[in-house]
Image: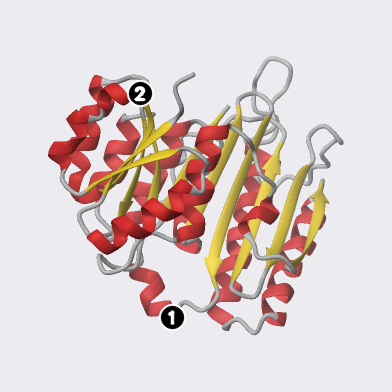
Amino acid sequence: MVPTRILLLERNKLHLRKLTRVLTCTGVEVIPMEDKSELSLHLDDQPAVLCADAVDLSSVVAILDARQDIRAVVWTASQDRAVLERALDHPRLSHILGRASPDVPPREWEILWTVRRMITGERPSLASLLHWGYTGFKETVRTPRDRDLCVEGVVRFCERLNTPGRVREMLGEFAHELLMNAMYDAPVDAAGQPKYAHDRKAQIELSDDEAAVIRCASDGTKILISVVDRFGRLPRDKVFSGMLRGLDGGIMDKSYGGAGLGMVYVYKASVVSIFDVEPGKRTEVTGIYELDLNQRIFRTLPRSVHVFIG
C-alpha cells in the first residue's frame, strides 16, 4: 500500500523546517520544498494534501484544477479577498490559515489538527482544540428564554476570565447569533421547508429532535464557542461568501435562512472558525478567540476558516 503523502511548499527555510517537523506528526510522509517548480516532480507520488503559503496560490489552484485527488491547505498573512475567492470556487480548498505576519508560521496546533483530521477523516472532540485542564459549560437550548440565559452565561464566563468589556460584548453577540441560526433558520419540516425562519422573534419551543446545543470553554489562552443544530443545512458556498462580506465589513446575507447563519458575526468574533457539516444531519459552527490578543491587532489579523463536509 502506498503511504499517504503531504506536499509542503514554503519559501521561508525556517518555517519550512518547523512545519515539516509538525506535519510529520500526522503520521504520514512529508515532502518539503522551497520552490514551486519542485511541485511537478512529486505529483506522481500520490500526495493527498498540498500545504502552501498563499504567495503561491496560483500554483496551488493550477494543481487542484489538474488533479482531482488532491486537497489543499493555504496560509496567509494578509486580509485580502484572493484566497477566500479561490476557496469559494474550489471545493477542495476548504482550509485557510491566517497568521499574524510573514515572519511567523501558521499556528502549530492548527495546521496539525487540520491536516491530521483531513487525512484520518476522524472528528475529534472540541477538547482537542484546548489545553488539558480547560473549563466551560454545555447547555441544550429550546426556547428564546434558554437562549438568553446561555448568552448571559457566555458573558459571565468571559467576565470570570477578566476579558475586556468590548470582548465580552462581542462574544455574547456571537453566541446569540449562532443560537438564532440554529433555532430559527436551521429547523425544517418533513418536506424540507423552514419551520421558524419566517419570524425570528416568535416565541418557539423546540422539540428534543430540534434543540440546539451550545458549548463554551476556555483553557486560559483561548475561548471557544460552539453551537450545534441537528439539520445539516449550511451550504459550503455560504461560508466563504459570508466570510468575504465580513472582510468587506458588509451586511449579513438575507437569502438563506434569514441571516445566512451570520457569517459576518463569525468572521468578526473569531480568529479561527470551524464549520462541520453532515448534510441533513448536523451543523456545528465553532469560533475560537485568542484571549491575549490586542484588539487593534485582532481587527487586522487574517482569519482562519475551516470547512468539513460529510
89 vs 291: above or below: above
Which numbered marker is on residue 24?
none
Please give the name of the residue rendered at 62% of the width and 67% of the height, measured from the top-left corner: 223
Q: Which callout, 2 or 1, points at the residue further toward the start of the chain? A: 2
- Label 2 vs label 1: CA separation? 43 Å
Please give the name of the residue rendered at 60% of the width and 81% of the height, measured from the top-left corner: 163
Question: Is residue 266 among the parts visible in the rendering?
Answer: no
Residue 130 is situated, as x and y percent measured from the top left of the image, at 64, 62
Please give the name of the residue rendered at 29% of the width and 21% of the height, measured from the top-left corner: 67
Q: Which residue is mark 1?
A: 294
| Mark 2, other Cα within 10 Å: few <14 / some 14–19 / many ≥20 | some
Amino acid type indicated by mark 1: Asn
- Mark nearest the camera among 2 and 1 is 2
- Taking the view exactly as shown, the residue that stands out farthest to the front is 1
Residue 57 is situated, as x and y percent measured from the top left of the image, at 21, 42
Q: Which residue is mark 2?
A: 46
- For this rendering, which residue is in front, 225 or 113? 113
Q: Secondary structure at mark 2?
A: loop
Amino acid type indicated by mark 2: Gln
- Taking the view exactly as shown, the residue that stands out farthest to the left is 37
Please give the name of the residue rendered at 83% of the width and 42% of the height, measured from the top-left corner: 205
- Taking the view exactly as shown, the residue that stands out farthest to the right is 208
Dividing the picture into quadrants, the one containing residue 196 is: top right
Its colouring scheme is secondary structure
Q: Secondary structure at mark 1?
A: loop
Dividing the picture into quadrants, the one containing residue 117 is: top right
Quick check: 127 left or right of 296? right
